Image (cartoon, rainbow, N blue to C red):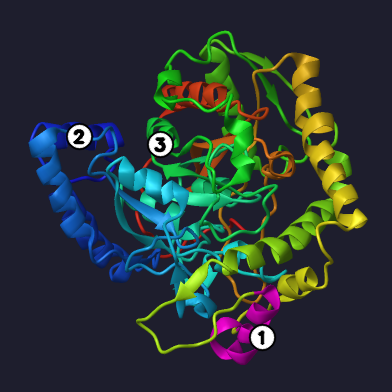
Amino acid sequence: MTDLQEVTVAELQKAMGDGRISAREAVEFYLARIEAIDRSGPQLNSVIEVNPEAVEIAAALDRERAATGTRGPLHGIPILLKDNIDTADSLHTTAGSLALVGSRPAQDATVVQKLRQAGAIILGKTNLSEWANFRSTRSTSGWSGRGGQTNNPYILDRNPCGSSSGSGAAISANLAVVALGTETDGSIVCPAHNNGLVGLKPTVGLTSRAGVIPIAHTQDTVGPMTRTVADAAAILTVLAGVDGRDKGTAVSAPHAHHNYTQFLDAQGLKGARIGVVRDGYVGLDPGLDAIIEQSLAAIKAAGATIVDPADIPTLPAMREDRQSEFEVLCYEFKADIAVYLATRVADTRYEEQPIPRTLADLITFNLAHADVEMPYFEQEIFEMAQAKGPLTDEAYLTTLATSQRLGGQDGIDAVMTEYQLDALLAPTGGPAWPTNYETGDKYHIGSASPAARAGYPLITVPAGFIEELPVGLTFMGRAFSEPVLLRLAYAYEQATLARRPPRFLPTLNNSLP
């Protein structure tokens, strides 16, 4: 087995078990592909750093396989991590910011510990929208001061979306088997959508955030970005569960499963009741609307009952009240980033320099290094967050309750109860926009916010193409409904098989905006 393009976790595991390839050979394949496609060739610029110990780790896992067998389905599987997930090795963890280059994590993030224990190989770190896209009101997704601009592998001058931009572009381009991303509001599902991938945003609290550079503890979550639903289920199996380092995971105790692949069922749409969220998402892009109608026909043909429309009743209120979610994030970022920064220690590879400990320190650093940190956009969000008070402020507590209610109890929960639904579906977004530092990001469709406010799960699956640009379909549900969402998404994926690998076209000469 010499070509690993589009290989799945299960296929690579079987090939290693049969002796057709070793973990070391798999790592060498991906490192060569990163050099040929990411560093040169199309120059995706999606992998910010490769692990210099990856080949050695792979060889040790090969010896372990020969001596005592495998640790499980991820034994020897190369995986990339978004560069806001701590690793206590030679790799950096910086959120794309030069402010964190002189310090390092004291220990692995819990999700990394779990991956290593499962036998996965940390191949490297992926670029991201700096500070997970929570620095400027006019940012360009996929850009960071440390990593530069990540490009979309389908059309290189189109945006990969953010903030898990590098994870999306890298896995779509087959630079590893799978990757981890993080999401606060759209940061897994949007780059998965723009890059033709499956992206699973777990319920907040199902996966640990310990050792992950935060935005907001009521919305942050870590999840897989993969080419297939089965691979997403395999990764979630390893990540899910209670972690003493993250008290927010205590809520997952009755809900976490030991094996999420058990829910994969090619006939899983049969008998399901699925509601279509049209208000705000359908009727805005003719090409996208055509794909949605084709998807609904495929879902209905697979045996599901379609309730159409099944609009989220609070969407008009959320559109009018966008500020409440943003206010929550500002309050929590100021507090949560200080808690995280307190865990950083000096990196002895660098001359001693002050370690930033507060948001104010980060603001000061950016001002002092504006030529490299703020050449295209500034730090308006940092400044707005810095102006917030403590998490005991009544304004914060009231706004949080309102935001969560609009997304959950009065929103997703209400419509699902009314129509007795297994899930809701909506387009994940529109086609990728051109990367432009003058105008910043140009989102015009995005269905992640209701679930983001509520902390509920999402999964996006490739649904089709507009010209050469992939678009995805999102299944959303109540808290801890991952088993249902995986079942429905897998059945949809098997019925449509819409993903196709990118061709690295330089531009798109048509009338798409």
* Callout 3 crowding tier (Cα within 10 Å): few <14, some 14–19, many ≥20: many
Q: Nearer the viewer, residue 370 or 57?
A: 57
Which label sits on residue 509? none
Q: Nearer the viewer, residue 186 or 259?
A: 259
Examine the structure image and report whether residue 369 is included in the region drawn in magenta.
Answer: yes
**Circle 2 is placed at which residue position?**
70
- How far across and how far down the image is residue 28, in percent? 17, 57
In this rendering, the answer to whether 370 lies above or below 307 is below
Which label sits on residue 238? 3
Q: Give the range drawn in magenta.
A: 358-374
Q: Is mark 2 on a helix, strand or loop?
A: loop
Q: Which amino acid does label 3 sit on?
A: Val
Q: How much space separates mark 1 and mark 2, taking CA atoms?
A: 49 Å
* First of labels 1, 2 by sequence position: 2
- How far across and how far down the image is residue 323, in percent? 84, 56
* Callout 2 crowding tier (Cα within 10 Å): few <14, some 14–19, many ≥20: some
Q: What residue type is labelled 1?
A: Thr
* Callout 1 crowding tier (Cα within 10 Å): few <14, some 14–19, many ≥20: some
* First of labels 2, 3 by sequence position: 2
In this rendering, the answer to whether 158 lies above or below 460 is below
Secondary structure of the magenta portion, mostly? helix
What residue sits 10% from the left and 45% below the top? 63
- Answer left or right for 288 relative to 181: right
Q: How much space separates mark 1 and mark 3, taking CA atoms?
A: 39 Å
Which label sits on residue 364? 1
Q: Which of 310 and 502 is in front in this view?
A: 310
Q: What element carries label 3?
A: helix
- Answer left or right for 377 relative to 492: right
What residue sits 15% from the left and 33% below the top? 69
Do tag 1 and tag 2 residues touch (Cβ < 8 Å)?
A: no
Name the quadrant containing residue 125: bottom left
